[in-house]
Image (spheres, grey):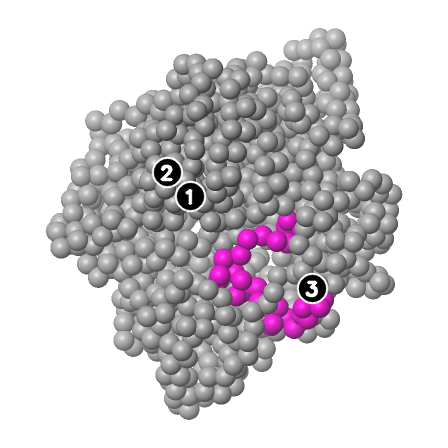
Amino acid sequence: MTKSIKSLNEVKIPETYEFVNGEYVKEVDSFMLTLKHKLSGARVLIFSNEDDNKVFDIAFRTPPKDATGVPHIIEHTVLCGSEKYPAKDPFVELVKGSLNTYLNATTYPDKTMYPVASYNDKDFANLMSVYMDAVFYPNIYKHEEIFKQEGWHYELESKDAPLTYNGVVYNEMKGAYSSEESVLERFTMNSLFPDNTYAHESGGDPKNIPDLTYEDYLEFHRKYYHPVNSYICIYGDVDIEERLSWMDENYLKNFPAIEIDSHIEPQKPFDEMKVLSTEYAVATDADCSEKTYYSFCTAMDVTLDQEKCRAFELISYVLLEMPGAPLKQAILDAGIGTDIDADFCDILRQSMFSITTKNAKPGLRDKFYEVIVSTLKEIVKEGIDRKDLEAAINSTEFREREADFGGFPKGLLYVLKTFKTWLYDDTLPYDGLIYEDIYKNLREKLGTDYYEKLIEEYILGNPHAVLVEMNPKPGLALENEKAIAKKLEDYKASLSDEELDELVAQTKALKAYQEEQSPKEVLEKIPLLKREDIRKKVRPLHNEEKQICGVKTIHHDIHTNGIIYLDMLFDVNSLSEYVPQISFLATLLGYMDTTEHTFREFDTETNFYSGGIGSDLNIYSLYNSEDVELKFDVKTKTLAGRIKDTVRLMAEMMFKTVFTDEKHLREVVAETRSRLKVRLMSAGHQAAVSYSMAGITVDGWYNDYSMGIGYYDYLVKLDENFDGEKEKLIKGCEELVKAMFKKENMLISCTCDDEDYAKFEEAMSSFIGKLDDFEKKNKADVSALEKYRPDVKYRKTAFSTPAEIQYAAVSGSYKDVPDVNDGAMTVTRHLLSYGYLWNEVRVKGGAYGVMCKFTRDGSGSFVSYRDPNLSATYEVYKKAADYLANYEADEREVTKTIIGTISGLDTPLTPAMDGKRSMNIYLTKTPLEVLQKERDQILACTKEDIRKTADAVRKVADAENICVIGNEQHIKDEASMFEVIKPLS
């Protein structure tokens, strides 16, 4: 058993593999082994280290030749049963019943990846087995219904009914093509690479998906899903020899190498820039006067040169992304749009650098390009500010070293980085991981014209570019729907009675297939852990109360590799009537001038000394109480040696911000509105739940008015009436700062180990002195601010958009249901989300996703994601309680659901997340005994306990407190469901 090796001498590689390379890579603290399976030709990369959150990934190079979405549909369908695991949906069975810390599959423009992760050795082996069997021996050849369900199919309920398209991928991509940004991004990439695989949408264009035949779909799998075209990664504290032998004996030895041409041919550079136009859909009555997008994008063959890639990331940030970035500011000053975005993409064979502005007037494309060129020429001539670049290097390197990827396993992100180069050159598996020497070189080049030369060569002097104008077209979505309906109507009219009968029969056969449950003996082939394999105790809390200069401080003593995570929390309960203003103030702090620095200089200072400084409004629902706590959070993360400078900058931001720059204030209002709308549209399920929850709880209302549709309405008012609102806004920000930042309101949260706490305490003592001085000199008067009082009442609201799909939410309260078992409610959430709701809304209904949630305060919600249906989905919600009341399952099935529930609770925590979890529990005043009781209830849950949750679930589903965000015609067709219908403009 060879685990966590430090050198080649510690491992015996099975003879069935050819050794290619082995070396220690410091940046990922792993001994890396590059191997090749001799018979099959499979490429294998091992990251050997002590991380027990193990990761496995098998990927294939899958270049599409058209926009039918065949790589995407295969990604969905291979996980719908295989030779060894013939259950209809092993993926969902694993979600339901494994201790995975990650389980997914993803289609990229040129590759498809199948990653899994788990802490548990047995579970990890099970996940590997199911995924390997899925990709090499899928049931797609046996059941055409899998292709129809996940890809696309004709749906005809009866000979007299309208003919329609349906399918999970089809509806997912209708949602993707409803996003303006997504439409532009795809159009730009396709146009920049017209002659290679990137000319085609790998996810599938809804117009083209129905062109894919079952035979062509199978042929794509036959061609590309062979080990010789695979890239296999294993990361973590894994028995290397055992896993390699297992892969050989069970799969790889069965596939002699063949010739497969999946090479990504580089696009031949253009002789001159292409100037293009396209359109996107807006509502039929939309004001199109300032809704044009402009984009300038260049292609550059630098992907395999990771130093240049990182240099362009720095250039992108300094010139276009940081506050006050010179090229961004030049475009804004020219009056071309209100929200500037930049992107450097290095996950393709040829990288792309793009500059985009939105909310612009039409007819400014040439001016947009002229501003970019003239400004860049001036920057090249004068030179990029070196302190800005050095600060950007510091900040980027800090994030690389911190390796905090939130809830994602660290190993998964490392695996993704290898594909930046490995996919295109077998000799470069590690280049995407190595950064220390690169940043050293980039620092040394600060004294040269290296960065300016890159701009000259790859942007100003590069003819391989596109300049795009994308204009809004009112009613385009309705036009597209009518065109599809007409196409289907004409096709139906061309069919004979016998052919119509056949379509009706196929529709019924597919529904029958979907209704049919996998036999018990088939389900039992999927490996399952036991309840005994699950940790019984809840994770410990790290909350030690201390004092710094009279301010209560909660120290979370956690090893953080020398990083201090700091949150200064200020009680703003007395200011609860100003939630939207406080939320916007959180955006402004750090984005406006101070008395000591311009906002651009301040950003440079924060990047120089820290991993960033920010602020937020947090809402906490107190345990076993109707009370809600509002905290204004000023936060940072920094190396312990730089805590003094970081805290000094935090004081400057809090006490010395100047809000009187009306021009810049106007820009921030417009940009914030624009970016929130993008988020509301792309994460419509979250926005819909937030809005509906605002109808039943005070904390729901606060959440909506601090980050949801309620807050968006506030920003729209500011944006569209800025001249009338600006004085109140400036005065309000000045007074809110005085009202919030008081010592008596302050609570400190610090995550670091004991060794660094002394440095932190010293820095905070100085800060609290400045806070005292600020408070003595300033008295707040918020009387002139507009008040927003919680208006918690039921809502039946629809927000119409040009999207071709819906997000349908309902929220309700079950507080009056007696003796609710919170642990069983958590199990029920998992059971419904990956059982009943999955089958009814996703599998049968064709939605891309569906979920539910129940909280210990007695509120709950259901919501669908990229859903072609509307009222039919609400009917499914309402029948959920009946499903639970009649729930029948054997012990194995219940255990599987419990294991999956625990998996969702025991996600991996970074040091920052661990400290935040402890602090959240402290702030909500949730006793550890309550958390343990809920875990005990989950582990002891029976089918009888699940049945008893039916009454609580019924209260939520029957509440009719609904919010829909979606297609304007679909909403009009079912207008009787709503009391209010309005556009999300």
- Residue at 49 percent across and 87 percent down: it is 550
> For the residue labelled by badge 3, is the local secondary structure a helix, a strand or a loop?
helix
- Residue at 24 percent across and 27 percent down: it is 270
Q: Mark 2: few, some, or many residues within 10 Å (few <14, many ≥20)? A: some
Left or right, residue 956 beside residue 361: right
Q: Which residue is mark 1?
A: 5
Q: Earlier in the sequence, mark 1 or mark 3?
A: 1
Residue stretch rendered in magenta on the structure:
902-931
> For the residue labelled by badge 1, is the local secondary structure a helix, a strand or a loop?
loop
Q: Position of residue 752 (x, y in %)?
A: 45, 69
Residue at the farthest bottom position: 776
| Total numbered labels | 3
Q: Nearer the viewer, residue 68 or 883?
A: 883
Query: Which of the two marks, 2 or 3, is nearer to us in this view?
Result: 2
Question: Which mark is drawn over residue 931?
Answer: 3
Q: Position of residue 598 (x, y in %)?
A: 28, 69
